[in-house]
Amino acid sequence: MNYKIGIVAGIVCMSISACFGQTSTIKPGQYRAVLKTRGGDLPFGLDIKPATNNPKTYTVFALNGSERLPMDAATVEGDSLRIPMALFESELVAKIDGNTLRGVYRRRRVALPPQTLPFEAQYGVTYRFTPKEETTTSATTNLTGKWATDFGSKTGKVDTVNAVGVFDQKGSRLSGTFLTPTGDYRYLSGSVVGDSLFLSCFDGSHVYLFKARHDPATKTLKGGLWAGIAGYEDWAARFDPKAELPDPAKLTYLKPGSKTLKASFPEPNGNVVSLADARFKNKVTIVQIMGSWCPNCMDETNFMSPWYKKNKQRGIEVVGLSFERSPEMAVSGPKIERMKQRFKIDYPIVLAGTNDKAQASKALPDLNAVVAFPTTIFIDKKGQVRHIHTGFSGPGTGKYYDQYIEEFNRLVDKLVSE
């Protein structure tokens, strides 16, 4: 090659690269990711692999304990990776630098500026909180079992029980969740280091970091919870194998004089669905009070959608009443449709109002209140409400999830047989 031509060609190539950039490549495999919170690093796992159906995209799973939660299709643009989570109006955006990703977790809310936390991820690292999880046990205590828990404790003691911790410890590794009257904290994963507990969860919506110290003499835990972008509260727990929550069948109920549930709301396509419609007549009907933004509702829908496909021929209908962050169909309709596509939902989902509990309660005046998302209402063939279950114990709760599914099927079998 002529020397001058080579110099010119090199300059042209450098100019093209400078003007248009070069697309970086990301190493496929598992990453140890952290969000930089006020409580310190909040770790979780990411599994990133090239998509089989589109070479320009990546499949990504968030790893929390035994859960592999699919994110939306990720893309690489220039030197940056973008992992969207449209259902939760959030995303991870990071610059690719060899084995390292550096960027931000960004969350959007209606009428508010985006909120962010710094984000980093390291390729090939699989431990959660400490490398000792994978080699030796660094724990001096075992926290397996049930713990009566008081979130918001100001004394460091369990003055009230508003949650039940259920933990399983193997060596230094700890997994479990907290049951509450309105749902659970989903899949928590972490470690016991010395006498201290460390647990975390990131699923695109939930951002949880738990820390606590164990006092073996009193069998108590005392610590803090960092939640979301800037939330914090103290918590305390007491080991109690008999710890229980209030009966979820007694928190939400029909007002005196009401026997049925009146509801009439539009689907994203404009079709109005009413519980008085012919499709529900003489059928057992299950009503989900839900929202596309709600991970616990996602857990329930992940059960309900395939269950409905299997059981609808028995004379059963399901309808979802979705309470979204915006009352505008132009804003919330596409989110409902994305949820239906993600979970392959065959039953109607309507926009019932906003997720403000006071407003949701006004939308369903037959109920004393909407206490939690999700809430499940069981209606018999005569159109009368027979049972209301507040909250949902998802698969992260282990045996409590199994117990709920058994009770769910037993109740539906009874109503179908009538």
Image (cartoon, rainbow, N blue to C red):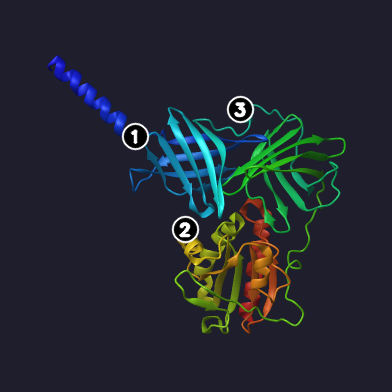
Left or right of 279 in this view: 39:
right
SS label for mark 1: loop
Task: Locate residue 168, reporting x and y percent.
Answer: 69, 43
Query: Pointer 3 and pointer 2: residues touching (CB < 8 Å)?
Result: no
Query: Pointer 1 and pointer 3: residues touching (CB < 8 Å)?
Result: no
Residue with the mark numbered 3: 131
State the quadrant of the C terminus.
Answer: bottom right
* Mark closer to the chain start, 1 or 3: 1
Residue drawn at point x = 22 percent, y = 26 percent: 12
* Mark closer to the chain start, 1 or 2: 1
Residue with the mark numbered 2: 342
Left or right of 278 in this view: 4:
left
- Which label sits in the foreground, 1 or 2? 1
Q: CA gap, disc 1 to disc 3?
A: 33 Å
State the quadrant of the N terminus.
Answer: top left
- Inspect the image, locate mark 1, and give the three-letter code of the amino acid beneath it: Thr
The image shows residue 79, relative to residue 297, as above or below, that is above
- Which label sits in the foreground, 3 or 2? 2
Task: Locate residue 221, reporting x and y percent.
Answer: 80, 39
Task: Locate residue 313, reporting x and y percent.
Answer: 50, 76
Q: CA gap, disc 3 to disc 2?
A: 35 Å
Residue with the mark numbered 1: 23
- Inspect the image, locate mark 3, and give the three-letter code of the amino acid beneath it: Pro
Residue drawn at point x = 49 percent, y = 36 percent: 30
Residue drawn at point x = 73 percent, y = 72 percent: 368
Left or right of 102 in this view: 399:
right
* Mark closer to the chain start, 3 or 2: 3
Q: CA gap, disc 1 to disc 2?
A: 29 Å
